[in-house]
Amino acid sequence: TQAKTLFPYTTLFRSDLGEERLKKAENFARRAPMVIAVIAKINHEVKKVPGWEQMLTAGAATYAIQLAGNALGFESFWATGPLVEGRELREAFGCNKNDKIVALLQIGTAAEKLERDCKPKDLSRFVSHL
């Protein structure tokens, strides 16, 4: 297989993103040493597994990659939205019309380790028991 370069990065994103978002897109690939594109290759001919389930499977795989990276001490960021919806990026990854770019997953070592306080939460509004 042939590796595809994402530089110049801005040419792979929708040109209607606006100047500020295009600048963010330009810096996106430089913020982490690894960017993994996760693409759901939706095949509607597979009747046993509906398209929505194929999409969820790609999302679960993305989350598994995040968990594995975290277990190895890396941080990650899952990008979606306007960054992954452009025709140019879909073409760069060879997406078919049914394919969906589920994530651009950045993985690397955080420049700063964020310290978070563990605060007990009242989950009774969200959790019920039978």
Image (tube, rainbow, N blue to C red):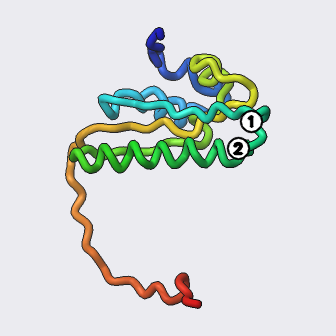
Instruction: Residue at 30% x, 29% y: name it.
Output: 33
Q: Nearer the viewer, residue 99 or 115?
A: 99
Instruction: Residue at 58% x, 17% y: name it.
Output: 92
For this view, does 34 lie left or right of residue 59? left
The amino acid marked with disc number 1 is Val
For this view, does 87 lie left or right of residue 39? right
Where the C terminus falls, by quadrant?
Answer: bottom right
* Circles 2, 1 touching at the beta carbon (< 8 Å): yes
Q: Residue 56: image x %, image y %?
A: 61, 48
Q: Residue 51: image x %, image y %?
A: 73, 42
For this view, does 105 lie left or right of residue 12? left
Q: Secondary structure at mark 2?
A: loop
Q: Which residue is mark 1?
A: 46
In which quarter of the view is residue 88 placed? top right
The amino acid marked with disc number 2 is Val
Give the Cα separation between the discs numbered 2 and 1.
Answer: 6 Å
Q: Which residue is mark 2?
A: 49
Q: Residues within 10 Å of mark 2 (few under 14, many from 20)?
A: few
Q: Residue 16: image x %, image y %?
A: 67, 30
For this orientation, the residue located farthest to the top is 2
Whether residue 110 is situated above or below residue 24 in the rendered picture = below
Whether residue 127 is situated above or below residue 90 in the rendered picture = below
Instruction: Residue at 56% x, 18% y: name it.
Output: 11
Q: How many numbered discs, if any?
A: 2
